[in-house]
Amino acid sequence: MRFEPTAARMWKRLSREERGTAAASFWKDTPPEVTGIAVAALVKARHMRPQVARAMPPEEQARALASVLDVGEPVASSLLVALHLGERRPMLATFLDAAGLAHENGLLKDEDDTPVTAEAARKGIAALRAGGHSPEQVRTYLNTLWLQDPDRWKALEDLPEVE
């Protein structure tokens, strides 16, 4: 499977709707240090004062951030995670259950960082496809996993493209 090598490139590849969903989730539950970087990206892209960007209601911040394609690597990474921890959380649980990986509501348990086998990944992907998730959603999720921990998810690289 071919992955985008950076979160910033993945962010640019998402649809407008996906970027909007990710940005809305991002503003709800993101560490302040990352939101500060996101505000800086808004200031730069929209040519506005930092005070104005910080004072915007969260819905406006989300719309504005979704329209910025060059948000930088840390923000793009957080946005991709927010996309999956928001509306797509059931997708995470489906994949992890089928792959036999311990998790809490779609979040992997930190104590286990054993590399995932190709067979476990295949089972997870099959469950996602059976659950009606589009190939693009599956690719985005798998690419996000891989970006978070390439060593743990190395087996995904050797799998065929999701169709």
Image (cartoon, rainbow, N blue to C red):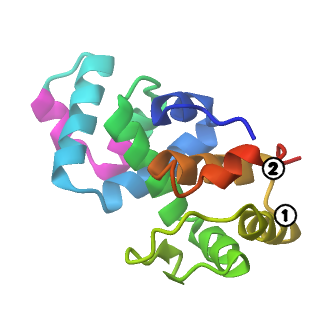
Question: Does residue 139 lie above or below 110 as drawn?
Answer: above
Report which quarter residue 160 is drawn in: top right
Relative horizontal placement of residue 10, taking residue 148 as reference (left or right) = right
Query: How far is disc 1 from disc 2 in space, using C-alphas?
Result: 8 Å
As drawn, the label of residue 16 is: none
Relative horizontal placement of residue 57, taking residue 110 as reference (left or right) = left
Residue in the image at 33% along x and 61% along y? 28
State the extent of the magenta-drawn residues as a range.
50-62
Quick one: label 2, few (<14), some, or many (20+) residues within 10 Å?
Answer: some
Q: Nearer the viewer, residue 34 or 149?
A: 149
Report which quarter residue 47 is drawn in: top left
The residue that mark 2 highlights is 135
Report which quarter residue 34 is drawn in: top left
Relative horizontal placement of residue 145, taking residue 24 as reference (left or right) = right
Element under label 1?
Answer: helix
Quick one: label 1, few (<14), some, or many (20+) residues within 10 Å?
Answer: some
Residue 128, horizontal then vertical, whole percent: 78, 66
Tell whether label 2 touches label 1 (CB within 8 Å). yes
Identified by mark 2, the residue type is Pro
The residue that mark 1 highlights is 129
